[in-house]
Image (spheres, helix red, strand yellow):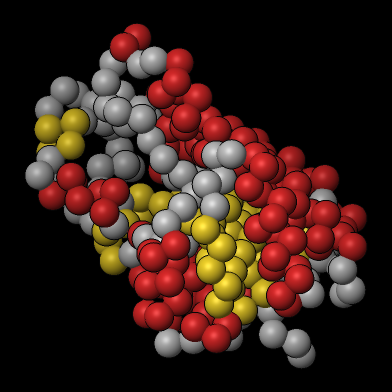
Amino acid sequence: MATKVAIVTGAGTGIGKSAALALLKEGYNVALVGRRKELLEKTAADSGAADRTLCLPADLAKPENIPPVFAATKAKWGRLDVLFNNAGMGAPAIPMEDLTLEQWQNVVNINLTAMFLCTQEAIRIMKAQSPMGGRIINNGSISAHAPRPFSSPYTATKHAVTGLTKSTSLDCRKYDIGCSQIDIGNAATEMTERMKNGVPQANGTTMIEPRMDVAHVGSAVAYMAGLPLDANVQFMTIMATKMPFVGRG
């Protein structure tokens, strides 16, 4: 069987890097997408399989940058089997009424619009290739289920990701394209470093929250990606066991 091909967005750090490393370990060719070329090259070097990577620096918040990423991947390897829609960001943790329109739109542009546009490009390749089909995995969040204080742009977009996941899963059945969502809670990345010093809770207190090794997220993404196309993990939640999610906030 030919080597499978994946695109991972936000592959320079954190969850994206972990997923890229896990997919490379499983033998995939992986296109690494992110804003900073040097971080993508570090991911490639750390994998020990740089010959199976393609570093594609791109700011996905700019729609014109998205089609070239997919065109370059197809030109390099001839097909696309997996897209991990991972790139995302949050807004400052301030009261909703103090957020600017620009801060709101910045989050929507990358968390939702860029994911939609990447999904479109993936579908176009996957439905036209032979053998037809593939898998799209969207990075949701625990915030796709329940918000943190002062997180309205991030939470709203992650709820919207769930709708996009369901619609993609439904509309792409006829093309043998499966669509999944992974909801992640407190993976140990740069983005969650602040949790070691305490983060706001629903009851107004501040609490240090447990985290988990981000490598577990990479392994979960690789598992979801590796299923045959007649099986799908529609939704997966992977989280630090003792984080304050299940229960009364």
Residue found 50% across the figure and 24% down from its top:
105
Comparing 106 with 57, the one in front is 57
x 31%, y 12%: residue: 98
Horizontally, residue 45 falls left or right of residue 210, namely right
166 or 92: which is nearer to us? 92
Pick the front one: 208 or 152: 152
Residue drawn at (89%, 73%) of the image: 130
The image position of residue 128, as x and y in percent, is 89, 62
Q: How many marks?
A: 0
The N terminus - image quarter: bottom right
Q: Quadrant of residue 109?
A: top right
Picture coordinates of residue 143 (x, y %)?
42, 37
* Residue farthest toward the bottom in the current orientation of the protein: 1
**On screen, 213 above or below 68?**
below
Rendering quarter of residue 202? top left
**Would residue 137 be visible to someone looking at this image?**
yes
| Rendering coords of residue 110 (x, y %) | 52, 39
Work out whether 87 lies above or below 12.
above
- Residue 91 vertical position relative to residue 54 in the rendered view, above or below: above
In the rendered structure, the answer to whether residue 69 lies left or right of residue 110 reads right
Going by the image, does 72 lie left or right of 181? right
